[in-house]
């Protein structure tokens, strides 16, 4: 075996060992004992709300989860789309510890990312100067995603998420 193959094999073994020992700081879709999983996007007071669309995620093995989505317009005229995806079938979202800030790099389109808390829940904020702002919030049993074509600040979209979560 060549020296390069030995090095590659050694690095692969180290990588597998590290990844198998890794435990994500915020596992999604794990309901806490204090809170019941939320399954429906409600209409907050003072907002205009579109039709609620709910898709059951079924498989041969049975019900695997749900996907609900709705379009909103806040009392201040901000338009947004929210999706709530949960259950045992959808893949979980791993959120690194809050305080991480990054961009899409030298060749990117200028997106920035930040991990933070939306209330008590870990979240990932994406700011895109061309497409708008999005936020994914891990709540017990599901992930709430909010997208808006407007360039909102991180604080503004977190506030919208908290209004939606409070309505649920």
Image: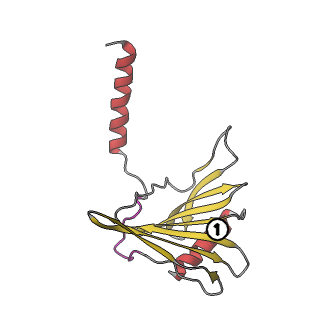
Residue 110 x/y as whole percent = 70, 47
Exactly how many numbered labels are in the figure? Answer: 1
* Residue at the far left in the pictured view: 61
Is 88 on the left-hand or right-hand side of 130? left
Q: Is residue 92 above or below residue 66?
A: above
The structure residue drawn at horizontal position 53% and vertical position 76%, both measured from the top left corner, is 165
- Which of the 4 image quarters holds residue 77? bottom right
Is 126 on the left-hand or right-hand side of 68? right
Is 125 on the left-hand or right-hand side of 61? right
Q: Which residue is mark 1?
A: 157
| Secondary structure state at the residue bearing disc 1 | helix
Q: Is residue 51 above or below residue 10?
A: below
* Residue at the far front in the pictured view: 60
The structure residue drawn at horizontal position 52% and vertical position 65%, both measured from the top left corner, is 137
Magenta region includes residue 101: no
The structure residue drawn at horizontal position 35% and vertical position 12%, both measured from the top left corner, is 2
Residue 82 x/y as whole percent = 56, 70
Residue 65 x/y as whole percent = 37, 68
Q: How many C-alpha atoms fall within 10 Å of the one at disc 1: few (<14), some, or many (≥20)?
A: many
The structure residue drawn at horizontal position 57% and vertical position 83%, both measured from the top left corner, is 43
Q: Mostly what secondary structure, the magenta segment?
A: loop
* Residue at the far top in the pictured view: 2
Magenta extent: 27-37
- Which of the 4 image quarters holds residue 118? bottom right
Quadrant for the N terminus in the image: top left
Residue 33 x/y as whole percent = 34, 74
Here the colouring is secondary structure
């Amino acid at each position: 075996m060549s020296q390069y193959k030995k090095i590659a094999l050694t690095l692969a073994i180290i990588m597998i060992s590290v990844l198998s020992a890794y435990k994500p700081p915020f596992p999604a879709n794990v309901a806490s004992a204090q809170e019941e999983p939320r399954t429906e996007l409600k209409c907050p007071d003072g907002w205009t709300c579109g039709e609620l669309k709910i898709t059951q995620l079924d498989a041969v093995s049975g019900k695997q989860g749900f996907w609900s989505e709705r379009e909103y317009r806040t009392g201040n005229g901000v338009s947004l789309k929210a999706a709530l995806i949960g259950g045992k079938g959808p893949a979980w979202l791993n959120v690194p510890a809050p305080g991480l800030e990054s961009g899409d790099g030298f060749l990117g389109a200028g997106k920035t990312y930040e991990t933070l808390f939306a209330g008590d829940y870990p979240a990932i904020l994406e700011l895109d100067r061309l497409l708008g702002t999005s936020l994914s919030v891990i709540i017990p049993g599901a992930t709430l995603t909010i997208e808006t074509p407007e360039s909102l600040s991180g604080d503004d979209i977190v506030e919208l998420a908290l209004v939606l979560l409070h309505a649920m």
